[in-house]
Image: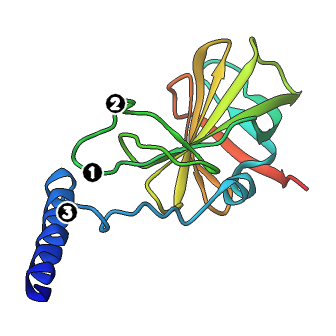
Amino acid sequence: MKTVKSVVGKLVIGLVVLGVLVLNPWFGLTATRFDYGAAELRAAVEGRWQLTISAAHQPTRVVTFTVAQGREVEQSAARGLVRSAAACGTRSLVKSAEACMDVTRMPLELKLASGEVDGELRGELSVYGTAFRAAAITVMRGGARWLEAKISREGSASEVLVDGDATAKLVRLARAL
């Protein structure tokens, strides 16, 4: 009798394990662990920035603006072979959910300090993957993509594009306090 219970118990456990592996063969192997959070993103991007734009046959323009974290910070993480019904959903830094790929997006508030820019500035910082080595900043001007750059974890900018042209330089003048 004791042997039958033992065999039945092992069979039930085996069926549960098999069911989990059939539904998600990566179970337990793909736990998403981000090595950064909102504090690291803010340290990389918040502060006072200066953008120098050099366009052909036009005078050089200098625009200075401040960048701060917007209201929402989101992360998404892929899990399993079968995606949730809300595929491409997001996960906040506080509460998790299923999604398509590992990505963190931080909305940015931009305030013009000097220079002229037509339209309201809105921005977003995006980090792809669970390790923060670099981020992509995108700034929209009045609804159109205006500024794109790569931002290092330390807060330096590279690969700067303004209106799709690579004749611009973006430098952080001061970190946020």
Query: For the residue marked with disc 1, what is the amino acid?
Result: Gly
Closer to the camera in the image, 59 or 101: 101
Could you tell me which secondary element the residue under label 2 belongs to? Answer: loop
Query: For the residue marked with disc 3, what is the amino acid?
Result: Val
Residues at badges 3 and 1 in contact (C-beta under 8 Å)? no
Q: If you read the primary sequence from the N terminus, does the residue marked by circle 3 or circle 2 appear first?
A: 3
User: How many numbered marks have been drawn onto this rendered protein structure?
Assistant: 3
Could you tell me which secondary element the residue under label 1 belongs to? Answer: loop
- Image quarter (top left, top right, bottom left or bottom right) of the N terminus: bottom left
Q: Which mark is residue 85?
A: 2
Closer to the camera in the image, 166 or 34: 34
Asked if 97 appears above or below 124 in the picture, the reply is: below
- Residue 49 percent location from the top left of the image: 78, 43
Q: Label 1, on which residue?
A: 80
Badge 1: residue crowd in 10 Å (few <14, some 14–19, many ≥20)? some
Residues at badges 3 and 2 in contact (C-beta under 8 Å)? no
- Image quarter (top left, top right, bottom left or bottom right) of the C terminus: bottom right
Asked if 48 appears above or below 62 in the picture, the reply is: below
Quarter of the image where one finds residue 71 = top right
Q: If you read the primary sequence from the N terminus, does the residue marked by circle 2 or circle 1 appear first?
A: 1
Cα separation, mark 3 vs mark 1, equals 17 Å
Query: For the residue marked with disc 2, what is the amino acid?
Result: Ala
Cα separation, mark 3 vs mark 2, equals 23 Å
Q: Left of 133 or right of it: where is 120?
A: right
Badge 2: residue crowd in 10 Å (few <14, some 14–19, many ≥20)? few
Q: Label 3, on which residue?
A: 16
- Residue 169 percent location from the top left of the image: 65, 42
Cα separation, mark 2 vs mark 1, equals 13 Å
Quarter of the image where one finds residue 35 = bottom right
Badge 3: residue crowd in 10 Å (few <14, some 14–19, many ≥20)? few
Give the farthest residue toward the front. Answer: 1
